[in-house]
Amino acid sequence: MRHVRLAAALLLLFHSAPDAQADEPQVHVGGYIQGRWSGSHRDDASPAWQAGGFALRRTRVIIDGDVGERISFRTMVELVGSPLLFDAYADLDLGCGLTLRAGRDKVPFTRSFLAGASSLTFTERAVVVDQFRWGRDLGVQLRGAHGPAAW
């Protein structure tokens, strides 16, 4: 509960900040909370197994922004349990649809894993995706986009 209050306080603190000028660094603070209800209803189950409950699945604070016209950054911290740094990277726009990313980010292995948790239909990914994903790692990545295609 303490983490939820901390996340709400951070969101309110930065929500009222004035807009930065075009040539100054811009910082945006946001985040999301995903809850989950779990339980079972079986006649032959013991009362301990029938008990269900509400839990916070994800509570994340996201800080991102731009430093100049070509450099952007993003950090994402998970607040459920002990705080954990998920993402921390910077992007350099190389022009012609190319971007160089350096830092800690998702390893691009499956398209489903690359989708953000806030854009999922359900609060969990498919079991197959969770079994074959590589998670997050430090590294450098060359990214690109041309029309509707992104790589």
Image (cartoon, grey):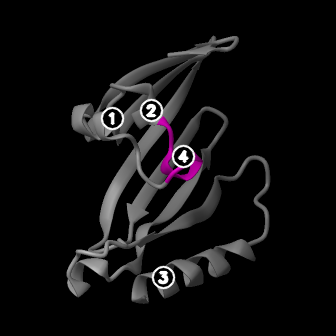
Q: Which mark is residue 129?
A: 1
Horizontal and vertical percent position of residue 115: 50, 38
Closer to the chain start, of discs 4 and 3, is 3
Q: Secondary structure at mark 1?
A: helix
Q: Residues within 10 Å of mark 3 (few under 14, many from 20)?
A: some
Q: Secondary structure at mark 3?
A: helix
Left or right of 36? Residue 8 is: right
Identify which residue is drawn at 79% across, 63% down: 19
Horizontal and vertical percent position of residue 83: 31, 71
Horizontal and vertical percent position of residue 148: 68, 14
Q: Which mark is residue 120?
A: 4
The answer to if 121 sits in the magenta stretch is yes
Q: Amino acid at mark 4?
A: Leu
Residue designated by label 2: 112
Alpha carbons under labels 1 and 4: distance apart: 13 Å
Left or right of 79? Residue 150 is: right
> Over which residues does the magenta segment extend?
115-122
Left or right of 18? Residue 80 is: left
Residue designated by label 3: 4
Q: Is residue 20 above or below residue 38?
A: above
Question: What is the residue that sits farthest to the front in this orientation?
Answer: 43
Dividing the picture into quarters, in which one does residue 96 lie?
top right
Q: Which mark is residue 20?
A: none
The answer to if 83 sits in the magenta stretch is no
Depth check, front residue: 39 or 126: 39
Q: Mark 1–mark 2 contact, CB under 8 Å?
A: yes
Identify which residue is drawn at 30% across, 41% down: 127
